[in-house]
Amino acid sequence: MVHVHRTFVVDKPNKVTSDYLADFAHATEWDPGTVACARVDSGPLRPGAKWRNTSRVLGRETELVYELVAMREDHVKFVGRNKTATSVDDIRLRPLGDRTEVRYTADITFHGVAKLASPVMRLYFERLGNKVVTSMQAAVDRL
């Protein structure tokens, strides 16, 4: 399993930040690994909503279907799955006046033969985690 955790501050209020992050289609703006992300269902944005996410990992594209499993002003959580991995993006938010502290955690569990790649993937996702901080801060700050 790969575990990446980052804590940082964005220059927008908590509600603005949580509303933005709850729509996973915005991952194209804040996740440097995401190539495309589109909602695959319709209706209001709420737990159970799903997106098809295409990411580039070590030069190869992979696709996961993500589901929104938690959506509150202080917590947004997605679970993505395909045959080789399960990815959990857990975002905790804490108001700091007109700013917001973001505690971003990504846990990726590899299945089957893909488990053998975990050590290499850990290094890749640690570097990507650093880029996510910069990208997410910039994306939220542009709102």
Image (tube, rainbow, N blue to C red):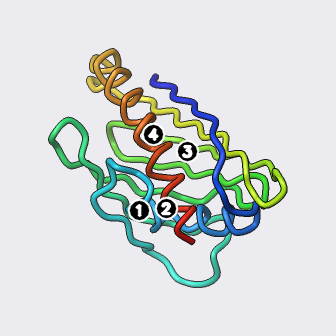
Could you tell me if the residues under marks 3 and 1 are in contact, i.e. CB atoms within 8 Å? Answer: no
In the image, residue 75 above or below residue 115: below
Q: Which kind of residue does numbered mark 4 sit on?
A: Thr
Q: Residue at x 72, y 45 (%)?
A: 101
In this figure, which residue is indicated by the disc labeled 3? 89
The quadrant of the picture occupied by the C terminus is: bottom right
Name the residue type under label 3.
Asp
Q: Earlier in the sequence, mark 1 or mark 2?
A: 1
Q: Secondary structure at mark 3?
A: strand
Real-space CA distance between mark 4 and mark 3, rounded to the nearest whole angstrom = 10 Å
Q: Nearer the viewer, mark 4 or mark 1?
A: 1
Q: Secondary structure at mark 2?
A: helix
Instruction: Classify residue 124 by image quadrant.
Output: top left
Question: Which amino acid lies under the numbered mark 1 shown in the image of this protein?
Answer: Glu
Q: Residues within 10 Å of mark 4 (few under 14, many from 20)?
A: some
Mark 4 to mark 2 CA distance (whole Å): 25 Å
Q: In the orientation shown, which residue stands out farthest toward the left? A: 59
Mark pair 3, 1: CA separation? 15 Å
Residues at badges 2 and 3 in contact (C-beta under 8 Å)? no
Compare marks 3 and 1 and give the one earlier in the sequence.
1
Q: Dividing the picture into quarters, in which one does residue 14 lie?
A: bottom right
The residue tagged 2 is 139
**How many residues crowd around disc 1 within 10 Å: few (fewer than 14), some, or many (20 or more)?**
some
Badge 1 marks a residue whose secondary structure is: helix
